[in-house]
Image (tube, rainbow, N blue to C red):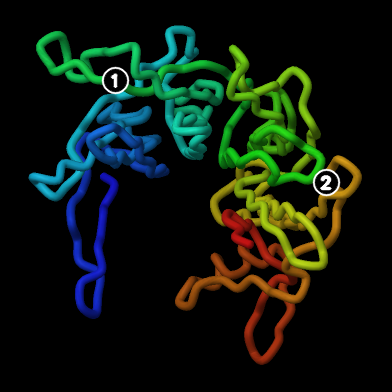
């Protein structure tokens, strides 16, 4: 479930755990302004929730009378998804009062097999979120598809985020590459123009830029005054470990890019001054596997140079 806390006096207290979200892995909050007030919503992406099968996206609406989020609707799975839609990343952008939601979906051996999708909130169409006898609800409808192999992270950003790009932009960390690669996670970071007025808003056929990656797992775009617009990419791993305790696949560098003349160019390698260490209390066999012959002893602690297996980044 997605758990919601609020600050009270001097600490956070639990408000609720959402219903129906057995594999909650991502969240997106949004609100819709009506003539009679503001409606508050929470979208929850679910993934890797076998054997319950509770994957996909559930949307919850804040109920003032109950002081909690109540189930509003489940986003219908796409009719042509090859397998289950296991949503690992969400990003939402409000464009003049119209919410757009992007879902990054997983593909793996557990049955998760779907591209990434773009949804638009539609007040004209209604569906029965809980069966034929349930109240009908307005909500998200799919409007576009991006052919990703594993959309580990997504960012839908407003117009003006990237200098010289007049439209909103969509960034996707496609963690994996096409099937058949020896190093299966040699994916890419996709930078797409996003036109809310178009029939297919994400212009994936004509990307602004594609950046080859070494297991891109997390993204962040931010601005440094006096320097420029930056893109940080956390690279996690290039393939699955060959055996238990094999950490060599996680020895990937993460990078910082700078927006210049219409694209991102590499600016800096991240984590060069850091070192990775194994957990206290591991066995000698586990420590040897972790090091893979790459450890050095500094201040009586064995460690591997640089960051290993970065899975999140924040600027």
Mark closer to the chain start, 1 or 2: 1
What residue is at 58 percent from the left and 38 percent from the top?
156
**Other residues around mark 2 within 10 Å, as few (<14) / some (14–19) / many (≥20):** many
Tell me the element at label 2. Answer: strand
Does residue 25 appear in the picture of this structure? no
Disc on res. 264 = 2
What residue is at 76 percent from the left and 55 percent from the top?
229
Question: What quarter of the picture does the C terminus occupy?
Answer: bottom right
How many discs mark residues in the rendered view?
A: 2
Residues 11 and 177: in front is 11
Question: In x, y percent, where is residue 137?
Answer: 24, 20
Above or below — where is 309 with respect to 31?
below
Occupied quadrant, residue 74: top left
Occupied quadrant, residue 9: bottom left
Disc on res. 188 = none
Which residue is the site of mark 1?
Answer: 138
What residue is at 39 percent from the left and 35 percent from the top?
47
Does residue 295 appear in the picture of this structure? yes
């Amino acid at each position: 479930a997605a758990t919601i806390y609020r600050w009270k006096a001097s600490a956070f207290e639990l408000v609720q755990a959402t219903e129906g979200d057995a594999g909650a892995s991502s969240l997106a909050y949004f609100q819709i302004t009506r003539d009679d007030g503001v409606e508050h919503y929470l979208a929850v992406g679910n993934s890797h929730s076998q054997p319950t099968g509770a994957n996909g996206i559930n949307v919850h609406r804040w109920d003032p009378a109950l002081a909690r989020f109540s189930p509003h609707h489940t986003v219908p799975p796409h009719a042509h998804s090859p397998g289950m839609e296991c949503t690992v990343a969400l990003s939402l952008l409000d464009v003049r009062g119209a919410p757009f939601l992007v879902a990054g979906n997983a593909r793996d051996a557990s049955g998760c097999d779907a591209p990434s999708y773009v949804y638009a909130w539609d007040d004209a169409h209604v569906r029965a979120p809980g069966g034929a006898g349930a109240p009908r609800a307005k909500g998200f409808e799919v409007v576009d598809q991006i052919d990703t192999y594993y959309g580990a992270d997504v960012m839908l950003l407003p117009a003006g985020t990237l200098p010289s790009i007049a439209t909103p932009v969509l960034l996707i960390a496609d963690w994996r590459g096409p099937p058949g690669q020896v190093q299966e996670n040699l994916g890419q970071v996709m930078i797409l123009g996003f036109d809310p007025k178009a029939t297919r808003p994400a212009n994936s056929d004509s990307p602004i830029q594609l950046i080859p990656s070494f297991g891109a797992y997390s993204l962040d775009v931010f601005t440094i005054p006096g320097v420029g617009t930056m893109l940080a990419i956390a690279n996690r791993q290039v393939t699955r470990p060959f055996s238990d305790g094999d950490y060599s696949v996680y020895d990937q560098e993460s990078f910082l890019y700078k927006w210049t003349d219409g694209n991102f160019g590499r600016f800096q390698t991240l984590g060069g001054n850091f070192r990775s260490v194994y957990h206290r209390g591991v066995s000698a066999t586990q420590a040897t596997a972790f090091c893979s012959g790459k450890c050095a002893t500094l201040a009586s602690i064995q460690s591997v140079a640089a960051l290993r297996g970065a899975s999140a980044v924040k600027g």
